[in-house]
Structures are given as C-alpha cells and as structure tokens.
C-alpha cells in the first residue's frame, strides 16, 4: 500500500541545509533566527571594536560606574546610556557584559573587562590593568538586563564600521521597535552615508515613531508614509499596530497605507504564484520532455519513464558520494559531472529495455504499457534493494543554494537554475531533432518506417537510439530533480501521470506542445492552489485535463488530417 | 434549384423516422429501425409495396445523394474545395482523380466521418448528412467499402454477415437477441451470393485477401443500403477478379446507387458508367469516360499526355 | 443456457460452486488436524481471492471483449468497498472509542458535529447495497459517456482512467472529504447483526463471494455470447467498420463499461468485510494496473482466465510476501514483462499456444498475434 502522495512539486521539500551566515543576497538574512543574529552581532562587535570610529569619545566613567552598584535597574540604565553614548568603547563593554566578562570590584567600585585573551582592562577607557584586584564579581544579569543587553548591542552596531552590519542592526531595531534606540538611530542616521543603510535606518526610525504617542504628529504621519512605501508584510503588521487613539491624521494615513500595502502584496502574491507555477512547469517539462520523445515521437508508452528520472537522481547521488569521499574540492562541480554520466547510464538502460522488451511490442501500445510497467516495478525494487527504501541525501552545490529577493517575492537559486536548465534541455533536444542526422533519421523512421528501411536506414538501431535519447533526457531530468525532490525509489512514480498529462495535453508528437503544456499546467496548478488548496487544486486540474482530452483527444497542438489516421 | 438553410433539428427528426429502403426483398418483414414518431404501419406497407419510393413531399431534391459546395480544410489545406456532386437513384458513378484529389475525404463526408466546414450534403433529399454520425448514416442506407478489406477477423464468416444484416442496431435490443428465421435466411442467401457458403464457420481473419473483399461486399449487401460507396475495389486483384467484381457491381447497381472510386482505368471502362473527375477537391470534368478522357485538363492533371 | 456455458465455463462454475460447498464443509466438519481441514484464518483469505477474481472478470469484460484497457478499475472496486464500509461504520454505533452513537470515530476526532449528508441512509443495509451498485455505476456511466462519445480510445483512454483513479485517491486522502482520510474506514464490528470476526460470518461471506463470482461470470458470459457481445468484439477489432455498419459504438461500450464498474463495486463490497478495512490506497493507480495483469496472466477475453489469473497471481503474492518479501516486486514485474512477451493468450491459451507451436513452428519473430486493441 502506498502512502499518500501529496503534490510533491511546490516548495514542499524540507530544507535540508541551514542558511549559512555567508549566504549570498540579503533576503536570506530575514529568516536568520533572532538569537543567532544577536550572536553574530556580538562576535562582530568584539572583532571590530578596536577599529571603531574614535572621533567622538565621551567620558564613559559615570555610566560605567553604575555597573558596580550590583543593582539590575542600574545595570539596565547604564546599558541604555551606553547604547546612546556613541562611544567606541560601549560595544566592547556590552559584549563583555553579555559574556559575563564584565567584572567589578565591590570595594573600589572599579569596573573592569576581562578580555578574551584573559587579561584585564578598564571598562571605561580600555586601558590595561596590570594587577588584578583580589576580589572581583561579575556584573549579574536577569531577564530584563539581558533584554537591555540585546537592545544595546543592536543599537550599538548601528554605528558599526561595516555597512552590512549597520544595516542588519537597523533591521533589528525595525523589528524590536525599541524606543530607547531612537537617539542612537537618529545619531546614526545623521552620519550615515550608505543609501541602503540610510533607508533601513529611516524605516527603523519610522517603526519606532508610529507607536510613540509623544512624537510630533507630523513626524508620525511621515513615519506611516515611509512604512507604507516599504510595502511588505512586516510594514503591514506595523501599520496595523497604530493605536486607534492616535491623532486622526496618523490613523487616516495608516489606513491608506494599509490599503496600499495590501494591494501591493496581492500583486506580489500572484507574481509569486506565477513564479512557483513556472518552477513547477519546468519540473513538469523536465519530466515530460523525454516522454515527448519516447511517447510523442515513437509512440511507445513507457511506464518506466519515471524510473529513468529516478535512476538519473540516483546517479547524482552516487557521483556526489564518490566526490565527497575522494575529491571534496570538486563538490560544486558534482552536478556538472553527474549530468553526462546520468545521460549515458539511463540512456544505456533505455537501450537495453528497448532491445529486450519494447522492440517486440511495437504497434501494440497496450501491451507495451503493461510490459514497461513491469520494468518499472523491477527497477524500483532493484534500487530499493541496493540503496534502501529511504530518502537519500543529495547535496546542493553552493551556486544552487540560497535565494534572493525580487520585490516582495523570494526566488531560490535552485528553482531558477532548474527553469533555465529545463529550457536549455528543451532547445538542445529541438536542435538535435531538427539539425542532426540522427534527428533526421528519427523523424524518417517514425514517419514512414518501411520507406526509411528501404532507403537503407537501420530502423532497429534508430529505434534503440531514439529510445536511449528519450531515456537519457529523463536521466538528466533526474539530476535536476534530485535538487528539489526526495531521492527515493518512489521518485519516478509521482511524475509518470503528470508527464503523460503534459504530453497528451500539449499534443502528442509536438515538442512545442510539450513546452506549452508543461508551463500551462504548472502555472494553472499554482494559481488554483490558493483558492482550492494543494490537493483539491491538483484534482481540479486532473479533471480539467480529462475533460479537455475528451474535447480534443489529440491535445492542444494536434496534428490534423490524414497524418493522424496512419 | 436554390436551397434554403436547413433546420438541423427538423432534419434529424425526419432521419429518426427512418424511411424504409427500396431493394428490400419482398420476403423481408418490415423490421425497419423503429423509433418514436415512426410512420404508421399502413404507410410502411404502402411504401414497401411500391416499386420505387414516392418522393418525400418535403424532399428538397430528387437526387438520392446531393452534395453542394462542400468544403473541408485541414490546417489550411483544402481537401475539398466547394465540391458539388449529384447521384441519382440507382445510378452508378465512377470517380477518378489523382492522389490527394479528395476522393477519400468526399467519402468521409458522405458517411459522417468528417464534418465539412461549409456546404450541403443531403441524402434522399431530406436527410442532412452533415448533422448525423456514422451510425445514423449507415442506418439510413449508405454502405461503405474500404480500400483494404475490413472484416471482423476474430468472428466467423457467418457472424460477420449476421452483424451486417439489417436489424435493430440498439445495444439493449441485442442483449436479448435470438436468431430469427429471417436472419438465418438472409445470411444463407448472402453467403451464397458471395460464394462463401463453404467458409461460413471459418474465422474471417483466416480468409484470403480476395475472399475478404467478397465477404465485405456480402456484408454491405446485408445492410441493404440504398447507396453504396466502394473505394478502389480492384486494388490488389487479379485481372479475372477485377472483371468479376465489375460484373458484380453492375448487378448490384440495378437495385441501388453505387459510387465507385477507382484508379484502374480498365476497370472504369468495364463499368461503363458516367465518370466524375476530381482534382484539388473539386469536380474537374463529368461525363462518359470517352468524353472526359479527351478533356485537355483531365489529361493535364491526371491521365498524362 | 447451452450456448452460454461452454466446457471451460462449465468446469469453472462447477469448481466455484464446489468451493462454496466444500470449503465451509471442510472447515466445519473436518477435525483441525486433518490434512484437508481449511483453517479459520484461510477463509477470509480465500474469500478475498474470490472477490479479486470477480473484479478480474469485470476488467476482462471491458478489456478482453471491448478493447478498453482500464487502468482505473480500482476506483470502482474501492467505491463499492467504501459504500459497504460506510454501512459497516454506521453499524458500530456507540461501540466506537468515543462512544458517539451516530458519528464514526474519525468524525468525532475531526470535530464533525453532524453526519455529512452523503452518509445518510447508509445505516440501512438495502440502501447501502443499492449504493454499492449505483455509485460505481454512475461514475462509470458519466465518465464513459464523455469518453466514448468523444471517441477517446486506446492508450489515451487508459491514461485518463488512470488519472481518474489518481484524482479520486488524492480526494479520498483528504480528511475533509468525510471518508476517514488516510486511515479510511476500519474497526468494523458487525454486519446485519452478526459479528464480523465470527468464523460463521466469515464462512457466509466466503460463500457469498463464491456465488457472486459465479453470478458475475454468468452475467458477463451471457452478455458476450449474445449478439451484443458479437458487436462488442467487432468494436474491439474494427471500431470504424462497426460504426459504418450502423452500430452506435459508444452505447455498446457504455453498457459494458458501466456493468463492469458495477461488478467491480460488488467485488469491493464483498472484499471490505473480509479484510476489515478500506482506505484510499485502493485507489492507487498501481493497484489498478495490477488487476490488468491478473487478466493477462489468466488469458484475456476468456472471463474464466481472468478469474484464474487473479487467483494465481494473488496466491503467488501471498506466498512471496510471506517467504521472500523483497522478491515480490521483481516477480510481479517479471510477470508483466513475461506475460506480454511470451504468453499473449495467458495460462488458458497456453495449451493451444504450445500445440500450435508443435504443429507448425512459428517464425522467429515475436508472435504476430492479432492484437486488436487499437
């Protein structure tokens, strides 16, 4: 009994990799968990503290002294003061406090920082302390203090030397909307030169201001407008928090902003669905394109087609395993190495199947269907026996991981590359069929076998090669699909019905029909999903295709006239 | 005569009424396809006894088959281009023309396999052939013989004929079917006529090519059609068989209309009937064979100099 | 009757009816140690095989005689099964885990407040039995009406039947369909007041399955030996010719198709109480394709062969999954390939095939058996 097969395309695949902090693009950073972000900030602070801008150096001694009172509220006050001091030392002190390395002498009330190297220095000035006082206690922290530490660290990194870090800090403030950070934000805004960071800072400032009851009305309205201009889900959430008792100008601006953002988001939601649809379409295209050869051109009903895709995915898995153990440096090239191997391997398997089974069944499509179904069962079980029934890990090379942001939608690199790849495969195949002698022979044999044989074409060999070509392309598809689907022995089964639907919908024997069919079905599926849900959307689409086939049994781009009869 | 656009529903109603067929042997009981609104029994009897069915008062033409301005195009290619053709009752007509002239497409239109894009196709002046499917058209009395003999290979010769004998064609009626004396007699008679009585229990698939041709002709006769369409009956036949077939067709044409599509000019000459030459989906010339074969355009496109 | 039952059919009927008498007799009368004693656990297993045999007969009616290769008969089987399962669920009454007198457990679990409208009436056995026939029949009628009228044939038809059952599978996996989602319907207690676990009930179900198989066979056999059946074969072998003879092919197909679906529904209804569960897995396309191989193994277009094939393949499956579970799919796959390549007429045609080969050696090329479907 098979387990339920929910639609497997979509973005349903579990993410296998944590987002690396060095991920390209900025969009990815949005999802970095808050705790991790703070950690990153702190680490960053310590390493760059020394290089921090030193032109303003207010005396920190009175603020630092408060750490020595052993009172949580004093500690929090001190943190707040430090964070808005603008001093380059402040970051080091906050970091030390966070790590429990901020110490004080209960007797002299001296506040010291134990450096990571183990030495001691004066908290306020950073001057090294030669002799350690006998009795040092760490400045204690409770939850409130910890929150204050986080806020202070965030605020302080607004003044960091690294623009990327400043921008992240601004984003953190935008999230926390901590009114205490306002002064620092203003200070940072005044000296900021990077336009991108400036925008981030302005948005952070606006986020604080809209909820700040004592802020001037004009500033709050301006803040609302700025957020509305940002136009994303977070801005929408913020605008919804504008209290009802805020001045009328603010609330009306907020209402208008919400409406604008909602319209904007709706547009991007559709765009995102179209993108998902394109992605699904490319998956369908990859799965169906080999079938367009074996079924569309040769008329062979190959139910083992999905298993060819599966074999291609397993080829990738094996190639990656070998690379991991013997040449890890080549890992980024693993897919490029797997492609020709998968093509050759599945192509050979295809030729083997054609020579041993299918060639005896030409002209008997229903028998071919049954025999190839049997082949598919054997292949599945063979893979299951060799590799086990569970999903296999297929890694992604670095150029395929991560995502970037376009407007309000995020685009993952692997999906983008797969779309590009599916089109490349499609046009390469078109070229092979139209421009090479093999293509000429294939077309000749499929159009008039006897005539082709009479002209000296070895039809048997062409049959085998054509079938091998179709299978090889399925294998290539498997390499690509290993990046977005679970690599298991059942991988192929999920594609077989869809592939047939695409080929039949597009019109058998017409490669362009397959292209249009794949993307039409992909986009239609994803546009239906928000209204009907994933499963129901899929069912609706299947029913629609069934009805469509009844209406136009020969597909979207049907051949008409006498050619169909033969 | 001018034709007003036909009301398809009106025509369909008439079709259902199913005019009985001439050529039915006197012995055959009036077991014509009956349907709601069929004519009264007296009317049927009257029609059956009449030597020739009186014209339907509503008939738009006296011709048995009337094609006017039929156009069929496949993806821009015009297989039939405003084709007009009139076949009279009990007329035999030979149709010749080069490959791609539209001969087969014309047969497809008459038998309902292909719907014309435009044009009028009337049977017996009342039935709009463009609005009916193959089964209805066959039940009206149009039989078709394919170029390659098409019989039911897995059935016996006898059953092949039995399936063709004119009777109720409805599915449920045939579940509770019992062989009638009439059917038995008809099958015997037809098998004799096509000289296959010794083969009656053999599987049709085991017959020789020529025997299959004759079996198919037997099946066509069993349908008791008023109009027979025959596609290249002489293809693949010996000279003797060809001559025999010509004789048989001439005999058949005494009781019903026959349209023969043929390439073999000797065979056409043997038939000795009016000839229509098709070219590029339209009628190029029409008349006795000697006359059309002297036509300069016919020589140009078909016969060659 | 004489025309309907030929020799093979006669032997088959005698065997089925003998099983209906002898298996219960052996189970009840013979001592447990006896070599001929059929143990209790075998009864539902054998009963299950018989329902599969009936299903295979139904598949053969459309494939063997009509040329329609259905890859979706599992859907009709499962719908019949669900109709029976719904009756059995309603019979549980307050004995469920949650003790709700009206709602089955899964509905309580999924926070249903009242019975969905399509569950109404299923507590009444005659109604459920009508639904066993009507639901698959109606689906088949609607599907066939569209498909046959638009002349979808051959592989295209096979693929859309597969899509049909695939779509139904997805639908039945949904919890909000009201059919128990993933888990399906199970935990049945009794049927017509008799405990479903009781050996006596199982014997009765076994006998009912045998009788249903015999009756299904007779109905199909009556159909295919009538003139209607001759037309059906004519459609299979030369559809276009049949049309030009004046037969409305789509109606002929539709009758056989709908009847076949109803028989499959009956098979499903008998299957469910014997195995004690029905779930959406029965809709899986793989199941439906497996049914086709039963027919192919036994011999397509023979009805008896279909039943025989179902018994052989399923007995083999039980044996393999017990002894060599890994090898079963290899064996099944090899069966698909081997039968289509070497045994086009199935086990029943094996004798004829062999004697034919002895009489005149066939050319080396694969046997050009007339394969009418398309």
Image: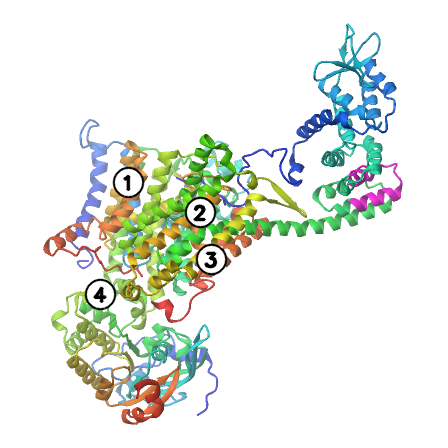
For label 4, the crowd category at 10 Å Cα-Cα, with few meaning under 14, some 14 to 19 and many 20 or more, is many
Please name the residue that numbered disc 1 is placed on: C331
**Residue at 51% across, 34% down:** A329
Q: Main secondary structure of the magenta part?
A: helix
Which sits earlier in the primary sequence, circle 2 or circle 3? Answer: 2
Q: Is residue A278 left or right of residue B297?
A: right
Q: CA distance from mark 4 to mark 2?
A: 45 Å
Estimate the spatial distance between the alpha carbons at disc 1 and disc 2, rounded to whole Å. 29 Å
Q: Residues within 10 Å of mark 3 (few under 14, many from 20)?
A: many
Q: Mark 2 and 3 residues: CB-CB less than 8 Å, in contact?
A: no
In terms of image quadrants, where is residue A108? top right
Q: Secondary structure at mark 4?
A: loop
- Which residue is drawn at the image coordinates 87% and 38% (left, top)? A215
The stretch in magenta equals A201-226
Residue, disc 3: A514
Mark number displayed over residue A476: 2
CB contact under 8 Å: marks 1 and 3: no
Are circles 1 and 2 on residues that touch, CB within 8 Å?
Answer: no
What percent of the width, then of the height, locates residue C112? Answer: 55, 40
The colour mode here is rainbow
């Amino acid at each position: 009994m098979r387990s339920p097969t929910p639609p497997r395309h979509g973005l349903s695949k579990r993410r296998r990799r944590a987002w690396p902090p060095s991920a390209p693009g900025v969009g990815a950073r949005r999802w970095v968990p808050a705790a991790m972000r703070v950690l990153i900030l702190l680490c960053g602070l310590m390493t760059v503290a020394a290089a921090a801008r030193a032109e303003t150096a207010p005396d920190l001694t009175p603020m630092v002294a408060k750490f020595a009172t052993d009172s949580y509220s004093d500690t929090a006050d001190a943190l707040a003061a430090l964070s808005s001091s603008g001093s380059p030392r402040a970051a080091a002190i906050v970091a030390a406090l966070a790590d429990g390395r901020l110490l004080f002498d209960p007797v002299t009330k001296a506040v010291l920082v134990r450096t990571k190297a183990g030495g001691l220095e004066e908290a306020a000035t950073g001057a090294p302390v030669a002799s350690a006082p006998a009795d040092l206690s760490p400045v204690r922290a409770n939850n409130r203090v910890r929150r204050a530490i986080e806020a202070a660290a965030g605020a302080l990194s607004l003044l960091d030397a690294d623009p990327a870090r400043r921008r992240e800090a601004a984003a953190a403030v935008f999230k926390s909307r901590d009114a205490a950070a306002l002064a620092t934000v203003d200070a940072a805004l005044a000296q900021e030169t990077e336009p991108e960071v400036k925008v981030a800072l302005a948005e952070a400032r606006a986020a604080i201001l809209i909820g700040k009851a004592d802020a001037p009305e004009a500033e709050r309205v301006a803040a609302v407008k700025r957020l509305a201009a940002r136009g994303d889900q977070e801005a929408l959430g913020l605008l919804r928090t504008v209290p009802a008792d805020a001045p009328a100008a603010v609330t009306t601006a907020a209402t208008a902003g919400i409406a604008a953002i909602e319209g904007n988001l709706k547009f991007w939601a559709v765009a995102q669905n179209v993108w998902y649809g394109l992605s699904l379409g490319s998956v369908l295209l990859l799965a169906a394109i080999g079938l367009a050869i074996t079924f569309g051109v040769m008329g062979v009903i190959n139910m083992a087609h999905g298993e060819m895709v599966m074999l291609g995915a397993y080829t990738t898995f094996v190639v990656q395993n070998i690379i991991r153990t013997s040449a890890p440096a080549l890992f980024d090239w693993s897919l490029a190495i797997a492609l020709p191997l998968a093509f050759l391997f599945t192509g050979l398997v295809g030729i083997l199947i054609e020579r041993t089974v299918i060639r005896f069944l030409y002209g008997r499509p229903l028998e071919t269907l049954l025999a190839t179904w049997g082949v598919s069962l054997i292949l599945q079980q063979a893979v299951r026996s060799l590799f086990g029934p569970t999903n296999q890990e297929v890694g992604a090379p670095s150029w395929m991981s991560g995502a970037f942001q376009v407007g309000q939608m995020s685009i993952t690199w692997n999906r983008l590359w797969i779309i590009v790849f599916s089109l490349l495969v499609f046009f390469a195949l078109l070229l092979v069929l139209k421009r090479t002698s093999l293509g000429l022979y294939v077309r000749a044999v499929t159009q008039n076998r006897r005539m082709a044989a009479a002209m000296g074409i070895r039809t048997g060999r062409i049959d085998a090669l054509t079938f091998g070509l179709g299978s090889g392309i399925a294998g290539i598809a498997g390499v690509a699909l290993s990046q977005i689907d679970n690599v298991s022995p059942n991988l192929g089964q999920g594609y077989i019905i869809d592939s047939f639907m695409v080929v039949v919908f597009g019109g058998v024997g017409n490669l362009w029909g397959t292209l249009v069919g794949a993307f039409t079905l992909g986009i239609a599926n994803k546009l239906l999903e928000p209204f009907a849900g994933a499963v129901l959307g899929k069912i609706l689409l299947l029913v629609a295709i069934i009805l469509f086939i009844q209406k136009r049994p020969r597909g979207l781009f049907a051949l008409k006239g006498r050619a169909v009869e033969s | 005569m001018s034709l007003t656009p036909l009301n398809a529903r009106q025509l369909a109603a008439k079709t259902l009424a199913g005019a009985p067929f001439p050529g039915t042997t006197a012995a055959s009981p009036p077991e014509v396809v009956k349907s709601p609104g069929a004519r009264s029994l007296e009317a049927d009897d009257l029609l059956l006894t009449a030597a020739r069915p009186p014209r339907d008062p509503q008939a738009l033409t006296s011709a048995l088959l009337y094609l006017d301005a039929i156009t069929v195009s496949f993806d821009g290619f015009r297989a039939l281009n405003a084709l007009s053709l009139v076949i009279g009752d009990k007329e035999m007509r030979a149709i010749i023309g080069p490959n791609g002239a539209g001969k087969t497409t014309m047969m497809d239109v008459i038998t309902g396999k292909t719907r014309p894009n435009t044009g009028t196709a009337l049977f017996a002046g009342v039935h709009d052939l463009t609005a009916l499917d193959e089964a209805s058209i066959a039940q009206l009395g149009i039989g078709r013989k394919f170029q390659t003999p098409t019989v039911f290979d897995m059935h016996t010769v006898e059953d092949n004929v039995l399936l063709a004998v004119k009777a109720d064609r409805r599915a449920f009626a045939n579940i509770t079917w019992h062989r009638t004396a009439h059917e038995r007699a008809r099958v015997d008679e037809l098998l004799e006529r096509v000289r296959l009585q010794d083969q009656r229990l053999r599987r049709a698939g085991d017959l020789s090519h020529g025997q299959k041709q004759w079996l198919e002709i037997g099946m066509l006769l069993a349908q008791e059609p008023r109009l027979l369409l025959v596609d290249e009956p002489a293809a693949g036949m010996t000279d003797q068989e060809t001559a025999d077939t010509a004789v048989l067709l001439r005999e058949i044409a005494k009781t019903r209309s026959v349209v023969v599509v043929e390439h073999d000019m000797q065979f056409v000459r043997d038939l000795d009937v009016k000839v229509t030459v098709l070219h590029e989906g339209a009628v190029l010339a029409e008349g006795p064979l000697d006359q059309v074969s002297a036509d300069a355009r016919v020589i140009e496109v078909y016969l060659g100099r | 009757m004489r025309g309907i039952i030929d020799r093979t059919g006669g032997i088959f009927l005698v065997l089925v009816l003998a099983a209906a008498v002898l298996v219960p007799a052996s189970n009840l009368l013979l001592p447990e140690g006896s070599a001929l004693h059929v143990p209790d656990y075998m009864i539902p297993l054998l009963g299950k095989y018989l329902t599969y045999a009936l299903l295979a007969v139904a598949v053969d009616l459309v494939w063997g005689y009509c040329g329609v290769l259905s890859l979706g008969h599992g859907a009709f089987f499962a719908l019949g099964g669900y109709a029976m399962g719904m009756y059995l669920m309603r019979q549980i009454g307050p004995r469920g885990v949650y003790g709700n007198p009206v709602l089955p457990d899964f509905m309580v679990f999924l926070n249903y407040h009242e019975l969905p409208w399509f569950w109404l009436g299923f507590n009444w056995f005659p109604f459920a039995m009508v639904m066993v026939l009507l639901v698959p029949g109606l689906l088949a009628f609607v599907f066939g009406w569209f498909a046959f009228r638009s002349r979808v044939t051959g592989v295209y038809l096979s693929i859309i039947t597969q899509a049909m059952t695939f779509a139904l599978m997805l639908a039945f996996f949904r919890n909000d369909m009201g059919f128990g989602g993933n888990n399906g319907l199970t935990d049945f207690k009794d049927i017509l007041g008799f405990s479903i676990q009781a050996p006596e009930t199982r014997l009765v179900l076994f006998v009912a399955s045998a009788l249903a198989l015999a009756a299904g066979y007779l109905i199909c056999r009556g159909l295919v030996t009538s003139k209607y059946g001759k037309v059906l074969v004519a459609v299979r072998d030369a559809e276009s010719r049949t049309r030009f003879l004046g037969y409305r092919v789509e109606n002929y197909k539709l009758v056989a198709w709908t009847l076949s679906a109803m028989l499959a529904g009956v098979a499903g209804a008998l299957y469910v109480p014997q195995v004690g569960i029905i779930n959406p897995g029965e809709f899986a396309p793989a199941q439906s394709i497996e049914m086709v191989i039963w027919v192919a193994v036994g011999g397509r277009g023979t009805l008896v062969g279909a039943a025989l094939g179902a018994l052989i393949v399923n007995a083999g499956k039980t044996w393999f999954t017990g002894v060599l579970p890994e090898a079963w799919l290899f064996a099944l796959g090899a069966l698909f390939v081997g039968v289509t390549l070497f045994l086009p007429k199935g086990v029943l045609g094996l004798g004829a095939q062999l004697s034919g080969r002895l009489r005149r050696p066939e050319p080396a090329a694969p046997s050009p058996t007339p394969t009418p479907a398309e």
